[in-house]
Image: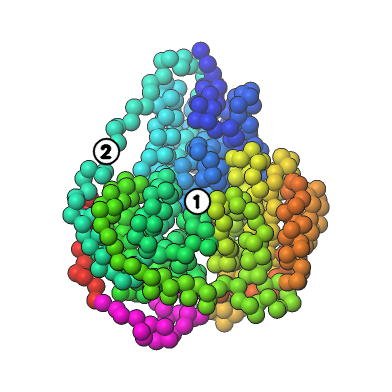
Amino acid sequence: MIKVSDYIAQFLAEQKISHVFAITGGASIHIIHSLAERKDIDFICTHHEQAGAMAADVYSRVSNTIGCSVATSGPGAMNMITGIAGAWFDSVPVLYITGQVARFRFKGETGVRQMGFQETDIVSMVGSVTKYVVQVMDAKDLRYELEKSVHIANSGRPGPVVIDIPDDLQREMVNPDELRPYIPEKNKTTSSIIDEEIFVEIINSIKQSKRPILIPGSGVRLANAEKEFHELMELTNIPVCPSWAAVDMFPYKNKLLAGTFGTHGVRSGNFAVQNSDLVLSIGARLSTRETGHPTSSWAREAKCIIVDVDQSELNKFSAFDKPLHLAINCDAKIFLKELINFIKRESFPVYDEWITLINSWRKQYPACLEEYKSEKEVNPYVFVDELSDALDEDDIIITDTGGAIAWTMQGFKVKKGQRIIHSFNNTPMGFGLPGAIGAALAFNGKKRIICISGDGSFMMNLQELATIQKHNLPVKTFLFNNSGYIMVQQTQDQWLDGKYFATSTTDEGGLSFPDFENVAESFNIFHNSIKENNSISKVIKETLSKEGPVLCDVHIPNSARVLPQSRFGFPIEDSEPLLPRDEFFNNMIVEPMAASKKVKV
């Protein structure tokens, strides 16, 4: 016989989870105690359940196992929801375990709001941001629900799952041999039902195109299909515009890299997509941040072939009034393998002129302009440029939202083996520090972790400096300190006459920030600062050379903005600061789109 909480800990160890992010409470103490008694699992005490949920998310992204976070009932479980939602929107498999009040204290059908202390219906609350959520009411179902949850989290389009376990059930004794297993249905082989004519149509579309573009998304990585995607690039010699979640798959020096695209993309990437005559998107959901609005103006002259494992992501284009040439519901790896088999039998056009044009755009419109380097105050684009030069291959970069992610994604020059991780679709402030903790522990402190945050985001999970310091994690945090929320200010510039209510430290702005170097001092973390452009390189090198955690306070003017940025609600090519259409489109040959047809496989 074994205690239920011990069985849970054993199950987590069998999943090769070596770190569980946990905050204790009356309804989770038994699970945590069972974890503590194992030598093959460490429980990591963050100081906020949100941080624990986010750390588990990144732990999953960079490791070969599922992440796990534990919280108590009521406020503990509810504090996890922002982190759970981030894993949901970014398709990250994470197992979230919440304690619940004892079953004999459930409110049931009494009509009262709460019976047991901190009783909260977490199952209903997280239903819309999880792949599966269950409250275990019988210990005999424990093995079944644990195995089912992990299977669902990892299958198809991955995502988070939540298991809610009452306190009294955690204390029961069970015989593991008597617990029923979960036996998943056999996976259907999607490749066998993709008609050959679909691949023939794709091949013909590529052959007929003069300006094709490949768009990979995070679905390529989730399907473990990076190798196949790069093989597709090599066989076809087609330029690539990655989504933000896939940008680290392509070193900056790759001649086929056109750049990111969308409302906060780089000019070369947007120019390439908007001038393409064929878009083949694989595993990218193509959010409105990427397509701009109206979506019908995106890739305006191109046949669009979209491949996604989630049929709903394909269906949405009807609502967007964006006709697709082909909509293919398939796993990225299965699709790429089949497509490559067909491509190897064919010969394709040479796209040298198209590639040369794209590379001329990259050269003509760099994120870090030469005039930025002559400024006295720290320019964020100069900083990102210098940081990317200073970092090594295989460094892991975690970014927060706002200017931190935008400047990084526009200006960072990726090297082989690096990862750039963000909560790309939920984009919560405060993701950086917890994400850095998850990444550092996934590599057992053997990889250097770079955290890029803004002052506003940093304040959201400031307390996690204590977690970083306690475990002496190699997290080098670069903090953009501009006394405000620049991304929201930029929106206020565009729509509200530059009145910075709730976004600056002025009287009307209402914000306040501490001296961050004093904050680092209070946590016993080494700190330094950058206040001028001419000291960026020196201080970055000093920061990276230090053992253990470091906080570098990067002072940038509060007038710094993200450029380029397209004004949302306007077609990308018509938005400032992109150049007027006729300045670079006049000499392009634009052929009419073929008749649109949608294919479901």
In the picture provided, is 274 more to the left or to the right than 190? right
What residue appears at the point 70 percent right and 52 percent down from the top-left corner? 476
For residue 344, the mark is none
570 drawn magenta: yes
Q: Which residue occupies the foreground of this view, 182 or 198?
A: 198
What residue appears at the point 21 percent right and 60 percent down from the top-left corner? 201
Q: Can residue 360 be seen in this view?
A: yes
Check disc 1 and report the residue beneath it: 86
Answer with the quarter of the image where residue 29 lies. top right
The x and y percentages for residue 384 are 63, 65
Q: Is residue 298 visible?
A: no
Q: Is the magenta stretch mostly helix, strand or loop?
A: loop
The amino acid sitting under disc 2 is Lys
The amino acid sitting under disc 1 is Gly
In the picture provided, is 137 more to the left or to the right than 557? left
In the picture provided, is 256 more to the left or to the right than 439? left
The x and y percentages for residue 596 are 21, 67
522 drawn magenta: no
Answer with the quarter of the image where residue 381 lies. bottom right
Magenta residues span 566-591
What residue appears at the point 56 percent right and 59 percent down from the top-left corner? 414
> Foreground mark, 1 or 2?
2
Answer with the quarter of the image where residue 422 lies. bottom right
Could you tell which of marks 1 and 2 lies nearer the N-terminus?
1
For residue 188, the mark is 2
